[in-house]
Amino acid sequence: MTTLPEIPDTATTAARLTGADLTLRYGDRTVVADLDVAIPDGRVTAIVGPNACGKSTLLRALSRVLTPTSGVVRLDGTALGDLGTKEVARRIALLPQAPEAPDGITVADLVGRGRFPHQTFFRQWSDDDEAAVQRALAAAGVEDLAERQLDELSGGQRQRVWIATVLAQDTPVLLLDEPTTFLDIGHQFEVLELCRELNEDHGVTVVAVLHDLQQAARYADHLVVMADGEIVAEGPPADVIDAPLVERVFGLPCRVVPDPVAGTPMVVALGRRSR
Amino acid sequence: MTPPTTRPRRPGPVGRRWAVVGVVALLLVLLVASVAVGSRSIDPATVWDALTAPDPADDEHTTVRLLRIPRTALIVLVGSALGAAGTVMQAMTRNPLAEPGLLGVNAGAAAGVVTGGVVTGSLATAGLWVYVYAMVGAACAATAVYALGGALSKGSNPVRLVLAGVALAAVLSAYTSAVLVSFPEVFDWFRFWDTGSFQGPAADVLGPTAVLVGAGLLVSLALTRSLNALALGPELGRSLGVHPRRAWLGSGAAVVLLAGSATAAAGPIAFVGLVAPLVARAIVGPDYRRLLPLAVLLAVCVLLASDVVGRLLVLPSELEASIVCALLGAPFFISVVRRRRVPRL
Amino acid sequence: MRPVTAAPAPTRPARTRTRLPRLHRRSLVTGAVGTVLLVGLFLLGLMTGSTTLGAGEVVTALGGGDGSAILWKVRLPRTVAAVVIGASLGLSGAVFQSISRNPLGSPDLIGFITGAATGAVIAIAVLGAQPWAVSLAAVVGGLVTAVVVLLLAHRRDGAPGYRLILVGIGAGAFLQAVNQLVLTRTDGQMAIAAQVWLVGSLTAISWTDTLVAVVGLAAAAPVVALLARHLVVMELGDDFAGQVGVRLQGVRIGAMMAATGLAAAATAAAGPISFVALAAPHLVRQIARTPATPFALAALSGAVLLLAADIVSQSLPAGIRVPVALMTGVLGGLYLLWLLTRSRWR
């Protein structure tokens, strides 16, 4: 792929990436059972839910990192298992939680490794690869950090570099597993703004597992709420988030009010002890 | 905001280039030394004559051509093999303490050879079969240590792999010693071989060793990009399109070819495969496309130096290269372990 | 404000019958079985060798009848040595594992036994020393290695943990190379003697060597017995033990010297024998399921293991002569590998 994907002309809710009857296990522990999911194309989707509800597990199954015990994940109609590994890697990119990098690696080297699915033994580094890396660095806002070592950067800068790495993969679908969890509030919003930019300006379908309901409500077009390995609600945030749902899923008595800036649902905990 | 960490800076691009030049220069010096030095010292001028205008009647020329050159060539091959095998093992297990000697792969090759000798009755006439026995033994040991060391399970601590390797090496070398003690005919052949030395007839083993080591190096080179992707973690590696089973099979084949043929040619030698990749990494960084070739060069330097030192230390007899490698490599290993944080690969 | 309810009236504590706790009983049973096993193996050991003797023949030989020469000069020292050396190694391993709070912290893995061997080899091959000097050299070698390894593995921020094991592995590899180096620098009879010695074996062990091991055990065992109580408390953590009144540093140093001495004396007597110090405490702990390191039982199980290994190595078909250290090397190594596969232990 030499150009970034085009922005779809019509608002489409067609789903390129779907999962049907997914059962996902770790050893003998079943995390998700018989789940159906459809990721709307060209949109930002957020997956939320309490700890250990299966959000990350679902994401990993959608990117083929985890093989479902039963059920099928389909991309553009074809089962992921039927597509070659590199073929999948050219269409779906996953940024795992807390990714690791070898000591002393430079930003340029790391982002360059995102080009792996586009290279072969005989075509190691082409102009396309160079251009893609430059684009990725620019999109993530880290061009001037290219020669720096990853270890020297701040948490927010590092996360943006990781995003640049998966951007360099040039995929139409981007999956992010808790991209904001270890960042301070300023950097959290930086990353979320970047996700929206990728989606609106470059047409990337973004799926992110997020902890913060507010942020999910503000930045996502489509919300998937999970609990105990099942999807308990999905749809536009304004339609999905209400007090009974939050209380049921998170055990938190609350009131849901419109965010003063964006108008999206904002969860305010009732609390007993707060002043 | 997390403060940026202060880590010792790796040499910049210019410094790197000079360092590589330095390594190549060192290699050339050691190559000359390996040919010139020994129980009988031969000066470089005579070496040059022996190469360009050999005089069959001259003793020194004969020594150079028939003994020193083949021996040096064998050291180059074995060193390359061990350096590449160590790099691949460290990359796949993401463990800076991994290498074929420490983790028992070389001991497995040795055990394979003696078992082959016992089963078939004689090793003196075994010829190329010795390599086969060695590679089978290396393959079994590699499989065992990867599986037992939890190299495949996520987040296992790096010590476990080393312990599995040490235990496996101990078991296998006890087994090998037991066989040698019980079967003297195997022991006779072994005397020239299992010592981790290059004192035996080198010329005969050059051919097959070169072919196998060459094949192993090619496979390793082909793996470098996948190793780069896998260095980002198993999940990201898979997401980038590395096929895990193919990567493990490929690297396993490379390690078996390299460690098996190196051990078949010169006996089990430890620590070379540990030192070379770690030093190379300190010079050129974590990109395996550059790391692997430099590690190979450094490993050859280490082994040449060890062999030369071994020839000089206990004149007129010789100290096996493997002993010198252990004397130098073990303190290096301890220094790596003592670092505040074991380096992440 | 919530009303304060009156505290319930105190009731008399229910009478409980004192009964031996289950765990304690289990270790007594293990000890009894182990002792019976040891006696049986001892007899078997006297019966096994290049010629097999029957039990009756053994008794007559002990009394001075036929074959008493073999019995008194060869088999009895061998079996006694196996028991004493096995017990020393088992006890040493137990103490180290208790102090390092690490199931792998045993003198064979962390290079102490190799260090004792280095001391002995230098004494034999370079100095051509008398047996008692060799033993002394072994003890010195072991102690020096212990000090060096512990210093190298020391962390400012607390217990050495796995670093101790790794440094020990490195030290062991270094010292093995040193042993080989010493061998190549000597020649003739001394080199051969040292070479043979480096493979631990109980075959043809003399009463003098056995005496060395006995002295080591007799000197160190009481020290361990005295410190055992403190060591058990220390296993609950330095903070707890300290505030309960245990003298941490003193106990630690004393116990380590005793344990190193045990391993070194054992090595001086028979050469380096690996894995008994690692396996014996583990094995017995699994069987007896004691909450703390079982010192006495570890010694017992070490004796049983080494004696069994020696009997096996003596019973192999003629022509296959395997010194006991190789036997323990293979079996013990396999046991360590098995330990590592248990996923609960990382």
Image (cartoon, coloured by chain):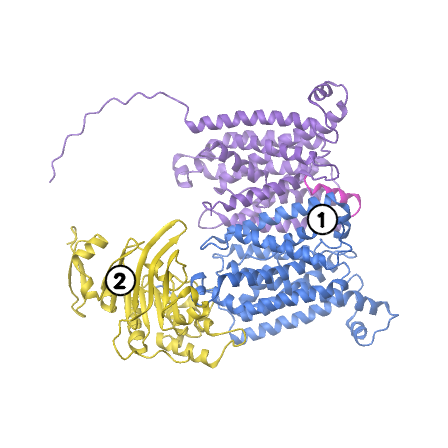
Chain colours: A yellow, B blue, C purple
- In this orientation, which residue lies closer to the viewer: C62 or C153? C62
For disc 1, the marked residue is B119
Q: Which amino acid type is shown beneath numbered disc 2?
A: Val
Image-based side of A239 in relation to C242, left or right? left
Residue depicted at 56% across the width and 32% down the height: C301
Magenta segment main secondary structure: helix
Question: What is the chain letter for disc 2?
Answer: A
For disc 2, the marked residue is A224
Image-based side of A264 in relation to A22, left or right? left
Occupied quadrant, residue A137? bottom left
Image-based side of C302 in relation to C46, left or right? left
The answer to whether residue A112 is magenta is no
Occupied quadrant, residue A265? bottom left
Residue depicted at 53% across the width and 44% down the height: C338
Question: What is the chain letter for disc 1?
Answer: B
Image-based side of B100 in relation to C52, left or right? left
Position above or below: B186 against C227: below
Check disc 2: other Cα within 10 Å, few if <14, some if 14-19, many if 20+. many
Q: Do labels 2 and 1 share a chain?
A: no
Residue depicted at 64% across the width and 55% down the height: B136
- In this orientation, which residue lies closer to the viewer: B227 or C174? B227
Check disc 1: other Cα within 10 Å, few if <14, some if 14-19, many if 20+. few
Which stretch did the figure color magenta?
C186-200
Residue B193 point in image, percent of width and height: 73, 55
Q: Is residue A217 visible?
A: yes
